[in-house]
Amino acid sequence: MAAFTDLPTDSSPRRRARLWWEIVIVLSLSLGRSAVYSVLSLIEALTRAPLSDQQTSLNPGAAPSEVWDVISQFLSALFGFAPVALAIYLLWEPARSGFAKIGLTFERFGRGLGGGVLLVLVIGVPGLVLYAIGRELGITVQVDASPLDSSWWTVPLLLLAALRAGLLEEVIMVGYLFDRLRLLGWNTWTIILSTAVLRGSYHAYQGFGPLIGNMAMGVVFGWVYSRWGRVMPLVVAHVLIDIIAFVGYPLAAAWWPGVFGPPGG
């Protein structure tokens, strides 16, 4: 695979305008829209009460008897993959698939899995510490990572949500945007820092701790992609981090209620 910095740029004004419109459309259908709502949510939260007294949920629960609610959540998660498919389709070339172009393949999967686990240790543990510090300082909303119930559908929906988040963020924020912004002539570190800020912004609804933590994650993931040229290790790491957060949340809430439990609990 050619080095990321060796990719050609496109100086045609018409082509550049088309690329910008394409980027705006893709982000408007996915993480750009999330970023706008997330920042607005943070601003609104700051006008209500201290962030430490507020709570948000990543994955809403549903009563076991509410079959249609479960179906609705499943379909919502399933349709959440559509922007990922769109980005890969737009990256497709006559002689090279969109999957191969960004390294979202099972080629050298063992190495990708090992790299993903390493990234979990580099990003996941410090992120958890940063969240705890943010809670203690009162600058982070209490995040309910998963519904506290034992319904049969809970774990499958959480696993699906983790896979959707991993693919959505890493394919679009890294694979797609890095390719498109490079074609527009941006240098590597400008792309890394810009996408890291955007990554942090759509986590702003959780407070300043996760915002900063996800920006740092974006820098690390962007640098790794610029070196490895493969999205797969990033997807593996992201999915593992989310699974740990979703499945481990009830235990953390029980062991450290002051940090992970509901406000006032």
Image (cartoon, grey):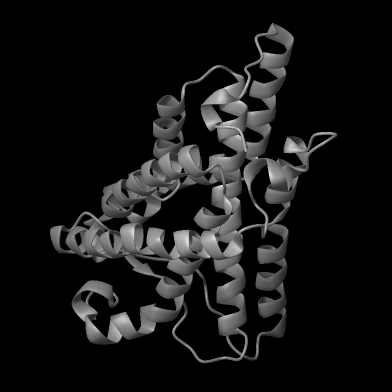
Q: Quadrant of the C terminus?
A: bottom left
Camera-nearest residue between 134 and 177: 177
Image position of 245 (left or right of 81)? left
Image position of 242 (left or right of 258)? right
Q: Residue 51 at x, y = what percent?
A: 25, 57
Residue at the right extreme, as displayed: 94
Q: Is residue 19 above or below residue 123?
A: above
Residue 201 can be seen in this image: no
Residue 8 can be seen in this image: yes
Camera-nearest residue between 88 and 226: 226
Q: Quadrant of the N terminus?
A: top right
Q: Residue 193 at x, y = what percent?
A: 39, 32
Q: Is residue 246 above or below residue 185?
A: below
Name the residue located 73 percent from the left edge and 10 percent from the top edge: 14
Image position of 101 (left or right of 33)? right
Q: Is residue 214 above or below residue 11?
A: below
Tally of numbered tags: 0
Q: Residue 9 at x, y = what percent?
A: 62, 17
Camera-nearest residue between 216 and 28: 216
Residue at the left extreme, as displayed: 137
Quadrant hosting residue 105: bottom right
Name the residue located 50 percent from the left edge and 54 percent from the top edge: 234
Q: Residue 33 at x, y = what percent?
A: 56, 42
